[in-house]
Amino acid sequence: MPTEKTIEKSIRRAAEGAGWLTIKMHGGPMTRAGLPDLLCVRSGDVRWIEVKQPKGQPTPLQFATMLRLNKQGTPARVCRSVEDAMAFLGEDAFVRNAIDPAVRTTERRRMEVKRECRSDRPRGVGSRGAGRRVEAGAGRGEAGLPG
């Protein structure tokens, strides 16, 4: 049976892949007791996820906190798998891909091709301008640019 930690990591990876910002809530003296494990935010949409093992149950305090969050209009739910969490986040395409092996195989191949393309790029070349070199003396007006 997978641990809560491994389920949580898988949920975070999938949610972030779908464009959600995920924040792990750690218990401690500066954190309110009973808050769900994950805070997920995307385009003003906020959702809370309490991660549990397949047969795990929230504590009474966690359950009461989730009820309060739901009453305030912020959805909170117990999720026991990546599929649960992605359905809760409204990522139905992820759930279909996870269930349909043909779609999952096609998606895996697409990701492999994407990785291969990245590895073929010369080092230092990227979308952020890293690795750009300017020839010595190629200032304004000297390289065909307006001066």
Image (cartoon, rainbow, N blue to C red):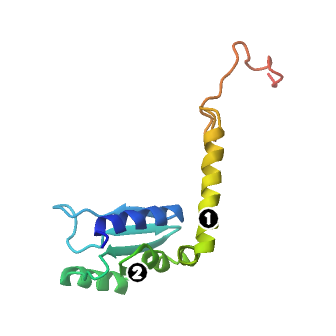
Quarter containing the N terminus:
bottom left
Of residues 5 and 43, the one drawn nearer to the viewer in this rendering: 5
Q: Earlier in the sequence, mark 1 or mark 2?
A: 2
Of residues 78 and 98, the one drawn nearer to the viewer in this rendering: 98
Q: Is residue 129 above or below residue 14?
A: above
Instruction: Specify the quadrant of the image occupied by residue 46.
Output: bottom left
Q: How many marks?
A: 2
> Where in the figure is residue 114, as x and y percent of width and height?
63, 51
Q: Determine which of the numbered discs, if any, sits on residue 75 in the image.
A: 2
**Mark 1 and mark 2: span between their CA atoms?**
30 Å
Q: Residues within 10 Å of mark 1 (few under 14, many from 20)?
A: some
Quarter containing the C terminus:
top right
> Where in the figure is residue 40, as x and y percent of width and height?
42, 68
What amino acid is found at the position of numbered circle 1 in the picture?
A: Glu
User: In percent of the image, x 75 and y 20: which residue is there?
Assistant: 140
> Where in the figure is residue 13, as x and y percent of width and height?
45, 61
Of residues 124 and 114, the one drawn nearer to the viewer in this rendering: 114
What amino acid is found at the position of numbered circle 2 in the picture?
A: Pro
Instruction: Describe the element under mark 2 as helix, strand or loop.
Output: loop
Instruction: Describe the element under mark 1 as helix, strand or loop.
Output: helix
Instruction: Left or right? Give the position of 86 relative to 36.
Output: right
> Where in the figure is residue 91, as x and y percent of width and height?
54, 75
Q: Determine which of the numbered discs, if any, sits on residue 107 in the image.
A: 1
